[in-house]
């Protein structure tokens, strides 16, 4: 079977990390400092030199690292999945259990090569060297973790001398005099522990016990000199202490849950272990009294890293307070004080306005050093700093409300050394909708071309991913630019909005990616209503007198205004122009133009699109305008009409347009009325009267009845309001815009 199937399940069961051997400097093996199993590697300390041997269970190499220089000295290929390592009594050879290749590789440490191999008929898992050329090797169980064996292999012939079955996942350790073999069966509840006498030809079971660790041991450390076994699971918050001689529990020692690797260091009298939780950490306890002597954060956000990174632990002798762990192997010098980020955590996000002291954790070293000076700064500004217990604290003078990245610097000094630490965090601001236009309950005097929503995207910035919205039940096109979301209220068929109440329903979807590549999603619902003023006035004929023009058109015009026929503006001829008295920034002007446009006859949608085309043409010529009422059209016998008003953005002008056309012949009559915006609503009823009065043939003077509603000879047309952009003169701008659309015209009539 393939090894990865066993390893995968083992990792899921938290049976993380490696068979670990710590040896002394006398030439004899003192004790293995950790036994556990993991899919990545095994760390073994050399007995005479500060070397660490790392077996890469996901590869084919054994790496040799120097704990003094913290560098790899050499490596050797031994076959795929080296799962366990033991050092020969004379210190010249490594015995490596190569699982996938089903063999034992013997590495000559002097020649740095594989001197020979022993082929097996099973996949080896854990190996220990005994007396009289005996090797003790457990096998990898099947995919259901059943069928593991304990095998005795002859080192010379390679033959399996003895097999004990039914032990499943087991790790081994050997007493310093090689008379007693210890085997721990992982993952079982309670944890089975076995002692075998191995100083004769056959293994003899001396004792076995289920232990008291009811979470199931995943990690083991053995102290033969003090008759002690330490058992830990990956979920328990205690380590069980068991006597080797009797296999009876002595009690428990409190520790942190989530253990991924464990090792016993006899020269320090400490039990080292790594944990996997919100952060990966290295801890050490004094085995004499259970007092914690080391707590070092290795990595924030441990869920983002492979927990095997901190799964193998060993304490090489002869180099002081140094621990080796991880894949690849890292060395941690625990003799020197250091600082670790406290609050805010590195790369964490605070809400704007957060208060509280900043902090850094102090590790005082082994042995502990006295801190003689210290300090903290925030973005280079000194903080009032003090030490409380093992925490360095700094007090900001004001709440942290400036969004963006911020840098914390902390430093400590002691007799003979100093260290400093810098990390960053950020102050986050939330996504906000600052305003909507038209606003809730607002009454506007024109039909808006767009709905605008101004947002503040916060820090880190949110990204708009989708917008589900409707205006009066119609889904418009939208875009987000410069933190303003704009949704159109118009399409080719007209406006979504009309005079009266209008409803906008909007669902905005945002997401934000933090510096740790975690994506936050955000949903922002908006529902509001606004109203559009009905700008269309009823016709009024006060002060109007019918005028029969030479072009054959009859219409009512203000009697007090000056009438001029056949007026040329630029290259465009108008039938007539009526100019009123100046009242404000400009004199009101009414112009009439007639002609023939074959597009009216050929294009049935010509009048429907006239307002939009005119506005687009004016904008193309640099005149910024907008429509202030929906185009209004109706059919009359033989004629169609459309009326609208535009307002100029940069000039105080409004222009009302009325187009009356014979759709059969293409004849048209265009009335343009330009007035000061301040006068528009006062003059609009009169302007409506002028439009309603237009007749193609001349009639008598305007009759006025008691209802002030004369018969003009044709039905009144409805209104279309368009507002136009800034230009020097209203009529000239209209002429330019009309010319831009290349609308053919008939000759001026005499």
Image (cartoon, grey):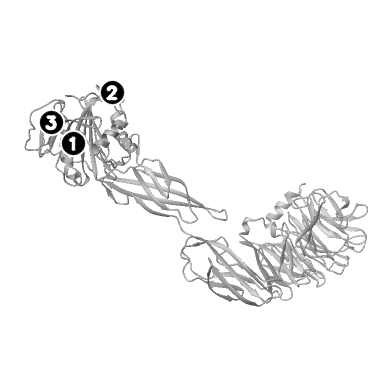
Mark positioned earlier in the residue sequence (1 or 2)? 1
Say which element carries label 2.
helix
Choose top left, top right, bottom left or bottom right for residue 198: bottom right
43 horizontally vs 609: left or right = right
Between disc 1 and disc 2, the foreground one is: 1
Residue annotated with mark 3? 712
Whether residue 14 sits left or right of residue 478 in the image: it is right
Q: Earlier in the sequence, mark 3 or mark 1?
A: 1
SS at circle 1:
strand
Relative vertical location of residue 3 with respect to residue 559 in this rendering, above or below: below
Say which element carries label 3: loop
Residue 527: x and y, percent? 36, 50
- Marks 1 and 2, how far apart at CA: 25 Å
Residue 397 is situated, as x and y percent measured from the top left of the image, at 48, 71
Query: Which residue is at the front of the view, 527 or 146?
Result: 527
Residue bearing the label numbered 2: 598
Left/right placement of residue 674 relative to residue 85 reads: left
In this view, the residue in front, 602 or 241, is: 602
Question: Where's residue 355, x and y in %?
Answer: 48, 68
The numbered disc on residue 590 is: 1
Q: Quadrant of residue 193?
A: bottom right
In the picture, residue 590 is in which quadrant?
top left
Picture coordinates of residue 19 (x, y %)? 78, 60
* Observer able to see residue 600: yes
Q: Tag 3: Cα neighbours inside 10 Å, few (<14), some, or many (≥20)?
A: some
Single out the mark in the foreground, 3 or 2. 2
Label 2, residues with CA under 10 Å away: few <14, some 14-19, many ≥20: some
């Amino acid at each position: 079977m393939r090894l990865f199937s066993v390893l995968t399940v083992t990792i899921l069961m938290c049976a993380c990390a490696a068979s670990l051997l710590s040896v002394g400097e006398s030439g004899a093996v003192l004790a293995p400092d950790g036994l556990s199993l993991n899919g990545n590697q095994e760390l073994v300390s050399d007995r005479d030199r500060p070397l660490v041997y790392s077996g890469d269970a996901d590869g084919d190499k054994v790496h040799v690292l120097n704990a003094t220089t913290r560098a790899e000295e050499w490596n050797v290929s031994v076959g795929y999945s080296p799962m366990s390592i033991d050092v020969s009594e004379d210190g010249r050879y490594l015995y490596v259990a190569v699982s996938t290749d089903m063999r034992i590789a013997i590495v000559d440490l002097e020649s740095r090569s594989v001197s020979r191999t022993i082929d097996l008929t099973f996949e080896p898992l854990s190996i220990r060297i005994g007396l009289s050329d005996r090797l003790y090797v457990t096998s990898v169980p099947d995919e259901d973790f059943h069928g593991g064996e304990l095998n005795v292999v002859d080192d010379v012939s390679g033959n399996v001398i003895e097999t004990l079955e039914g032990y499943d996942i087991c790790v081994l350790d050997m007493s310093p005099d090689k008379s007693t073999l210890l085997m721990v069966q992982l993952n079982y509840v309670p944890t089975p522990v076995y002692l075998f006498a191995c100083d004769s030809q056959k293994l003899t079971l001396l004792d076995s016990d289920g232990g008291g660790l009811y979470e199931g041991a995943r990690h083991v450390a053995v102290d033969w000199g003090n008759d002690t076994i330490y058992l830990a699971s990956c979920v328990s918050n205690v380590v069980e202490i068991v006597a080797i001689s009797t296999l009876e529990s002595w009690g428990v020692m409190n520790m942190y849950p989530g253990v991924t690797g464990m090792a016993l260091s006899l020269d320090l009298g400490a039990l080292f272990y790594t944990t996997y939780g919100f952060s990966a950490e290295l801890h050490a306890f004094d085995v004499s009294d259970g007092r914690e002597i080391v707590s070092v954060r290795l990595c924030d956000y441990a869920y983002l890293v492979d927990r095997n990174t901190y799964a193998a632990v060993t304490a090489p002798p002869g180099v002081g307070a140094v621990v080796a762990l991880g894949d690849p192997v890292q060395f941690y010098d625990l003799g020197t004080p250091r600082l670790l980020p406290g609050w805010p955590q590195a790369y964490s996000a605070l809400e704007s306005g957060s208060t509280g002291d900043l902090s850094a954790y102090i590790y005082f070293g082994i042995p502990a050093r006295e801190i003689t000076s210290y300090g903290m700064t925030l973005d280079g500004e000194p903080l009032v700093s003090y030490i409380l217990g093992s925490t360095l604290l700094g007090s900001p003078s004001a709440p942290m409300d400036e969004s963006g990245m911020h840098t914390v610097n902390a430093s400590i000094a002691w007799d003979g050394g100093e260290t400093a630490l810098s990390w960053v965090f950020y102050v986050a601001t939330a996504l906000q909708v600052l305003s909507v236009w038209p606003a809730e309950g607002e009454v506007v005097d024109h039909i808006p071309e767009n709905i605008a929503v101004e947002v503040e995207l916060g820090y880190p910035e949110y990204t708009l991913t989708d917008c589900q919205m409707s205006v009066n039940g119609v889904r418009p096109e939208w875009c987000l630019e410069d933190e303003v979301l704009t949704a159109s209220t118009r399409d080719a068929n007209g406006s979504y909005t009309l005079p009266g109440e209008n409803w906008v329903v909007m669902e905005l979807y945002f997401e934000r990616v933090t510096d740790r590549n975690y994506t936050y999603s955000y949903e922002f619902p908006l529902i509001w209503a606004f109203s559009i003023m009905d700008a269309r006035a009823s016709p009024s004929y006060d002060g109007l007198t019918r005028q029969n023009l030479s072009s054959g058109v009859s219409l009512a015009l203000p009697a007090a205004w000056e009438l001029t026929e056949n007026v040329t503006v630029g290259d465009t001829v108008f039938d007539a122009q009526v100019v009123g008295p100046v009242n404000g920034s400009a004199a009101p002007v009414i112009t009439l133009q007639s002609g023939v446009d074959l597009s009216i006859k050929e294009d049935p949608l010509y009048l429907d699109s006239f307002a939009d085309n005119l506005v687009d043409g004016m904008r193309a010529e640099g005149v910024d305008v907008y429509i202030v009422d929906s185009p209004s059209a109706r059919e009359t016998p033989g004629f169609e009409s459309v009326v609208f008003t535009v307002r100029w953005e940069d000039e105080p002008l409004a222009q009302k347009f009325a187009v009356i056309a014979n759709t059969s012949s293409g004849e048209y009559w265009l009335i343009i009325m330009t007035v000061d915006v301040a006068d528009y609503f006062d003059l609009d009823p009169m302007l409506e009267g002028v439009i309603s009065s237009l007749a193609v043939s001349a009639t008598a003077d305007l009759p006025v009845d008691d209802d002030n509603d004369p018969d003009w000879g044709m039905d009144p047309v409805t209104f279309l309001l368009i507002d136009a952009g800034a230009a020097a003169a209203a009529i000239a701008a209209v002429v330019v815009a009309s010319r831009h659309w290349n609308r053919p015209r008939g000759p001026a009539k005499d």
